Image: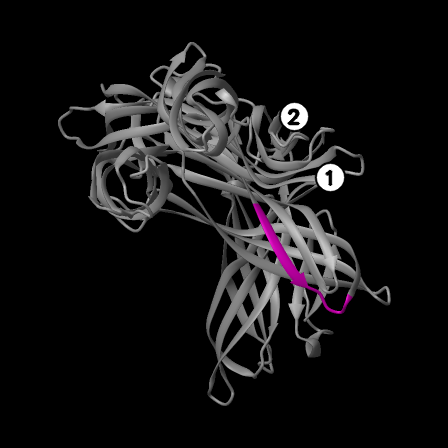
Amino acid sequence: MLILCLNVDTSFFSIKSNFMPFLHKKIFHLIKLYGEGHEMENFRVEEIVWGKVYSRDVHFDIKLKPLPAGIDDIVTKVVNIRKNINENALVIWVTLQIDIYFLDKKGALHCFSEEKPLRYVFFPEKIIENMEICVACSAKPKESYLSGETLSMAFLLQFNIKAVVERSDVAPEMLNVMTEKIVTFRTVEEQVKPGIARGFFECPGCTAIIAVKPYIAGVQARILKGMVVVEGQIAVDIFYQGSSGVERHGQIELPLEDVVACSEALPEQQARLSVFFHDVYCRPSRKSGCYDVIIGFELKVKVVERVENRVVTDFDREGFKVVKEDLLLKQVIDEGQFSFLRQQNFKISPPAGKKIDLYGRVQKLCWEVDGESLVVNGTIGFELFYLDESFREIYNFLEMEFSENHSLGKVESGTEFDVQAKILHLITAECSGEGVLIEALVEIKYTGFVRQHTLAVTDITPREGIERQLFQVDKILETRTFDLVENIEIPLEYPALYIEDIKGEIQNLDVTVLDHRFLICGELDIHMYYADPGGIVRCVKTVSPFGVLGEISGGTKDMQVRVLSRAERVSEKISGPSLVEIMFNLNFNAEATRQEDLYLVTGTSDRSSGVYQRVSTDEKVMEISHIMPLSSPAIFIKEVNINVEKSWLEEDSSGLWAAGSIRINAIYTGRDNLVYQAFDESAFRFYIGAGRNLDGSRMEFTAKPRKILLNAGGEMMEGEYEVRIKACYIEVKATP
């Protein structure tokens, strides 16, 4: 297809037309504009219910031919914006038109055009009866990369969406309702960014690295517009073997500084951070006794917005139908982790000669909030297995108490916390005499949340004057507690005289959501110490896998199930010379939640606090004269259908222009009495005006045929087509 451009008084209009090659000398277009448009005495007052700008990233790969040598320019525009509300969801269809100008190896300029249809779903923040949604969309190129014949491009689409409702001069009757304050946290954006921290560990007496344990020592996040600034430190505990052969401990701190791009972030929002360490390297450097420390991690940033509003809980009036829902909500307001190192010197009896094994677990854990700090208290139990001075195997159970404060900042009223603790690493000096020094590196993970129970109104009909707002909530579907009894038989290598001690804990707990059911899998780790007939203490370790199936009433596959577990020893029995039977009771506390987007009634319309605009309508009419070639000579035109194929707005120094194209579909009878169908397109661009506040999100384009003629030979169809453009002009400030 070739393109003919006729420029006749470019301040008035310009024309583009597609035509077939064999008729390129005779085809032309004429466009007539009927005056400056007919001003319609149609004024109304509208209230802006809500408005928001959404951003979406788009990536495309396009192959160019002939082989490009370089890109000269990329021009984008958004055409054909369509919208529809489907079950409280706003569905938007747009077409992104991309024009790529590139040079080939010979230096010739080429143009390649591509159209990409896109669809997006948004949830309106509020819903009011007879609400009108206005959508404007723009596209901005972000980056492009040319590799061979493939051009990779990234674009930023910005949707400016607002909702308006027409208001009459008479305010509606205010309805008396009962309300309750509800606080929710809406997830605005989530970003994951990989990072690397490098450091240097110097220890002249180090002969071997035993373990490297990184954790977050302190981190802060500051939200700016479009970005989150992260500042803090990564503490790295390095456990190594000294020159004397005894395990030692050292620590270094690495800076954590990064800027994470979050296009929708605003200073008044909150940021939640979490760091996942996936690669840890500690390698000798060129200098003796020095090591290079490299930590690979992923930084996850979640931007949340605190939404506080009042929802209607009761409404009693004749003639209205009220729909209520019993809501049990759980809103996570804070989460994080911290680590600390504790050591204690224990006296043991009989005196130790050599350590065989050491195992530790956090047995008791409690916590409380003191002002702006989280105070965690607990007890660590150590299973020490060693040889005494007579080389007899001895078992001792030791306990270490700890108390740790962690600063939280401002704590919301009614906040509850879930705290979990685990031991990352244990160090014990060589047992000697009556004392042994034990060091434990402990990690604490905490989650702060607020529970709220309310009977909220989700809908009132009729909806005249009723406002509904969108809330993103975490609903508690059900909380269940159940037990699983495990009978375990442990074979012994030596006969058991008596049992010294048995310790068990649940490890590697995993929860899989199936549908309304969920599967809990894990392992029960058991350590048993017993004495044989010779009085020698023996140790047996075994792992018993288990699985249990749970069910949640009203559960779905997209729910989240959080499980807390506890293992309690019930009984043990020596069944034979080499067999011990142990019974454990495994207790599970499961809580199922589901994130939902709910529309709740927030009250009645308040005219005094709204933002209003005065809207006027202007309509312009233009006529396009188009000569369309026919593939077969026609004797009769049966039907001609016209529709606006593309439409968009353009702006230059003279003002606004409406541009687009119409698609002509003609059905006619040929001279051979057969029915034919022909298609053609005609581009248009004409002047709208300047100096007026045009609402580009509410432009309406319509087209229809006015006059259809055939030339003498019936080879071409001459038509006059009418294009109407309805535009809205607004005044931002108005009175209701």
Quick check: 648 left or right of 16?
left
Residue in front for this viewpoint, 403 or 240 = 240
Q: Position of residue 327 (x, y in %)?
A: 25, 30
543 or 489, nearer to the observer: 489
Checking the image for residue 312, the label placed there is: none
CB of mark 1 within 8 Å of CB of mark 2?
Answer: no
| Label 1, residues with CA under 10 Å away: few <14, some 14-19, many ≥20 | some
In the image, residue 633 lies at what x, y percent? 56, 83
Q: What secondary structure do most residues of the magenta stretch adopt?
A: strand
Quarter of the rendering occupied by the N terminus:
bottom right
Residue at the disc numbered 2: 253
Provide the residue designation for mark 1.
284
Spot occupied by residue 315 in the image (x, y as percentages of width and height): 19, 24
Q: Is residue 59 magenta?
A: yes
Image location (x, y in percent) of residue 736: 40, 22
Residue segment shown in magenta: 57-67
Colour scheme shown: one colour
The one of 115 and 470 positioned closer to us in this rendering:
470
274 part of magenta stretch: no
29 lies above or below 324: below
| 105 lies left or right of 488 | right
Tell me the distance, in whole angstroms, between the alpha carbons under discs 1 and 2. 18 Å
Per the image, label 2 sits on a secondary structure element best described as strand
**View extreme (top): residue:** 371
Amino acid marked by disc 2: Glu
Q: Quadrant of residue 187?
A: top left
Q: Is residue 569 left or right of residue 379?
A: left
Q: Is residue 551 visible?
A: no
Q: Nearer the viewer, residue 338 or 49?
A: 338
